[in-house]
Image (tube, rainbow, N blue to C red):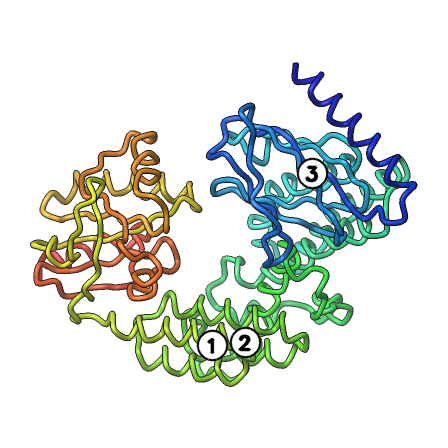
Amino acid sequence: MRLIYTTIIVTLMLFSCKKDKKEAAANYAYFGGEIINPYNNYIILSKGDAVIDTIQLDTKNRFLYKIENLNPGLYTYHHGGEIQMVLLEPQDSLLLRLNTLEFDESLVYSGFGDKKNNYLIEEFLENEIQEKKIFKLCQLEPNKYSSRVDSIKNAKLAKFDKFISKYDSSPLFEEIALANINYNYYSSKEVYPFVHYGHNKWDILKAIPASFYDYRKDIDYNNALFKDYYYYNRFINHNINNIALSEHMSHEANKQFDRASICYSLDRLNIIDSLITNQTLKDDLLYNFTLNFLSRSTDENNNNTILKSFLKKSKNEADKTAINNYVDSLNNLKQDNILPEIQIVDYNNNVFDINSLIKKPTVISFWSHAYLDHFKDSHRKINELKIKYPDVNFIMINIDDNDILKIKNALKINNISLQNEYAFKDPDKSVVTLAVRPMTKTIIVDRHQKIVNSNSNMFTSNFEEQLLGAINR
């Protein structure tokens, strides 16, 4: 049946393609497929920051969608907490098939446009494996390391050349495929001083030969085509971190590196401001790097300092408002402040002020349907901690603006008890008030409803030490 279904759909698509080719406007693509063990009954298709549509799955977990007025390039599709990209060009008729139990590993494409997308997903999976190898190779001295990553790049280029000699390809596909190879290679170079086992980053930087970063002179830091492309963004982030490292160490008196220091973070914002001229790209990077620092900071003076630098450089008013609000929330969540009053709802629709539930040391953590791995890992970790610390109260809060029954069902499907499980009554407001970012954020409160740590993480090595501090207050 599956073969018949696929054959019929592809035939219909190809027939439609032939028909539409005769028309003046043939700028469209079909995108469809089948999802096995779906998380829900829809996928979300987007390009960049713009959502194109929410596409419903039918009763057999299949979908088919025609994109009119196609803007050729990389599109993103979301399902559950998973995300993947697909290259669509005019008159493509592309079907995917995947099993959510092994989302990326099971993904395969058929139809017109399948070869280029199967090539890209295969490269994606290979890169995930090679990334782990790169971290081990980073322990080599610079010249040997450079030789090894050069070999990896050359093997990829040979594979690319073989592919385009065997199959028809487009200039857009070739540009993306080569960018994939190059930006992975560049990232491997940029990450070297951070992953190298040596603790003295100044000594590591001095040992790197001048030719190590020769490719930087050819980098386009304002490539709007790749603005939402994972490999380009990963490289840009590593590159800014690395350039800022050199800048930071040049004026750091004791030549010691602290990734969380306010000075290093200010250097990063200055590097972004000087390198990036495309204002959209610049604003995105400024926002993400600022948020990255703030999400790990508990110092009000540092928060205000980084905010001032960000506001001076960004031109995005929505980002400015969001960061301002985030800093205000962080500063209100200082140690020894009383936890703000937030209303939460249990799964019998009872409403509580959160502080009314705090009678003993309490850990408050958060989850979302958009981060399924974290949902499972955090609940597993909480269950371990409950056994070790019976005198601590553990509260889990869903942050999604969803129907309470949908959240309840997600817990039941995963065999999670509803005890001490809640949702925000007003998610949008509460997420801002408690500065819930990143999703691993955990708040520790003592028996007096005073904040011990508003920016903790249950997966870090010192979390239990912080928990004991709350118990002993």
Q: Nearer the viewer, mark 3 or mark 1?
A: 3
The reply to whether callout 1 and callout 2 are in contact (CB within 8 Å) is yes
Q: CA distance from mark 3 to mark 1?
A: 37 Å
- Give the side of residue 123 with respect to residue 326, left or right: right
Mark 1 lies on a secondary structure that is: helix
Q: Which residue is mark 2?
A: 316
| Picture layout, residue 302 above or below residue 231 | below
Q: Residue at x 21, y 61 (%)?
A: 342
Name the kind of residue labelled 3 in the image. Phe
Q: Give the mark count.
A: 3
In the image, residue 370 lies at what x, y percent? 44, 46
Q: Specify the label residue 393 is tagged with.
A: none
| Picture layout, residue 339 above or below residue 52 | below
In the image, residue 162 lies at what x, y percent? 86, 38
In the image, residue 235 lies at what x, y percent? 63, 60
The reply to whether callout 3 and callout 1 are in contact (CB within 8 Å) is no
Q: Residue at x 71, y 16 (%)?
A: 4
Q: Residue at x 56, y 28 (%)?
A: 58
- Give the side of residue 55 with respect to residue 15, left or right: left
Q: Earlier in the sequence, mark 2 or mark 3?
A: 3
Classify the position of the C terminus by image quarter: bottom left
In the image, residue 143 lies at what x, y percent? 69, 59
Q: Which residue is mark 1?
A: 320
Q: Specify the label residue 31 is tagged with.
A: 3
Residue 12 occupies quadrant: top right
Q: Nearer the viewer, mark 2 or mark 3?
A: 3
- Give the side of residue 249 with respect to residue 151, left or right: left
